[in-house]
């Protein structure tokens, strides 16, 4: 993954560092919540740029706590007489909770603005160029729907990852060339040429993509393309 894509992912409100997660876990006296933390921290972190020099404390994870769990964490961290680190943790968890509520930053006292829809779509394109499945999955909301028309739709970020893995596996390089991009509120459309280097030969597919984006990530992705054009090149 390149640095631009990595920084874009780390700026998301649902991406936390190992240090913050471990610190929060140590201060949440709730066995059920601690079990969720343990499961999360035992998973592989988001892939880092090749020249990244930080230690394991800087590992970054996409968190998947539901709203009730997030509120319980905030309730256990919040209170009078908080030190600077505790106040920061509460703000970060409130930002995560606000992501689900679609609230603005002033209501929750957030640190900075969330990624704009076009920025999220750009991060997805960059993740494909890097052939980074972790980064690709992290671009989607947990219940996202991916419809690579005319094929069947796929629901859920984990299922989307599984459906895309063969495409990344067959290509030694991928280049998503965005020709035009436009946004209308939470909807982004882009005209692309998707290029795959397969067995030393480039395959190019013309695509029109439609993306629906929320604070939780990309919730819907529909790509319109000529399947015959792709099959003819694969069989050539």
Image (spheres, helix red, strand yellow):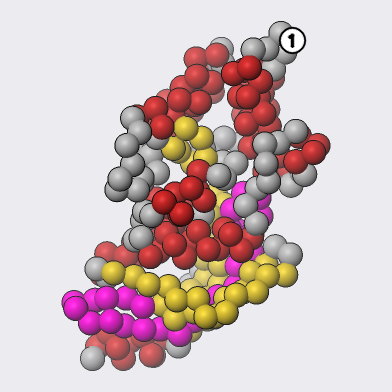
Query: For the C terminus, which image quadrant?
Result: bottom left
Position of the N terminus by quadrant: bottom left
**141 left or right of 152?**
right
Residue 171 placement, left or right of 89: left
Q: Residues within 10 Å of mark 1 (few under 14, many from 20)?
A: few
- Residue drawn 57% across and 45% down? 12
Query: How far from the left and from the top, in percent, is residue 190?
Result: 57, 76
Tag 1's secondary structure?
loop
Q: Which residue is mark 1?
A: 80
Between 173 and 40, the one nearer to me in the picture: 173
Q: Is residue 82 above or below residue 226?
A: above
User: With 233 as the anchor, is 95 left or right in this view?
Assistant: right
- Above or below: residue 18 compared with residue 142: above
* Image location (x, y in percent) of residue 215: 66, 50
Tell me if residue 17 can be seen. Answer: yes
Q: Which residue appears at 31% of the width and 83% of the height? A: 203
Compared to 221, does 32 lie above or below? above
Position of residue 91 measured from the top left corner of the image (x, y, whole percent) = 67, 29
Question: Residue 135's x, y, as percent?
Answer: 43, 52
The chief SS type of the magenta part is strand
Residues 64 and 129: in front is: 129
Q: Is residue 209 magenta?
A: yes
Which stretch appears magenta? 195-220
On the question of residue 143 being in view, the answer is no
- Tell whether 109 sits left or right of 157: right
Q: What is the residue that sits farthest to the left in this orientation?
A: 199
190 to 89, vertically: above or below:
below
Is 198 part of what is drawn in magenta? yes
Q: Residue at x 56, y 67 (%)?
A: 221
Q: Nearer the viewer, residue 85 or 51?
A: 51
């Amino acid at each position: 993954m390149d640095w631009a894509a990595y920084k874009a992912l780390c700026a998301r409100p649902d991406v936390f560092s190992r240090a913050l997660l471990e610190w929060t876990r140590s201060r949440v006296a709730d066995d059920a919540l601690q079990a969720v933390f343990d499961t999360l921290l035992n998973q592989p972190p988001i892939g880092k740029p090749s020249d990244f020099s930080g230690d394991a404390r800087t590992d970054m994870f996409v968190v998947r706590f539901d709203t009730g769990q997030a509120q319980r964490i905030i309730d256990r961290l919040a209170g009078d007489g908080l030190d600077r680190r505790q106040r920061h943790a509460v703000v970060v968890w409130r930002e995560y909770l606000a992501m689900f509520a679609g609230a603005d930053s002033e209501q929750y006292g957030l640190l900075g603005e969330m990624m704009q829809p076009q920025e999220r779509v750009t991060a997805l394109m960059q993740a494909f160029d890097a052939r980074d499945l972790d980064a690709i999955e992290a671009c989607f909301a947990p219940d996202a729907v991916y419809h690579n028309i005319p094929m069947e739709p796929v629901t859920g970020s984990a299922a989307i990852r599984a459906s895309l893995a063969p495409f990344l596996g067959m290509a030694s390089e991928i280049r998503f060339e965005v020709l035009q991009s436009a946004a209308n509120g939470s909807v982004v459309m882009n005209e692309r040429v998707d290029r795959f280097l397969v067995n030393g030969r480039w395959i190019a597919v013309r695509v029109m993509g439609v993306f629906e984006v929320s604070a939780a990530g990309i919730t819907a992705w529909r790509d319109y393309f000529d399947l015959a054009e792709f099959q003819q090149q694969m069989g050539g």
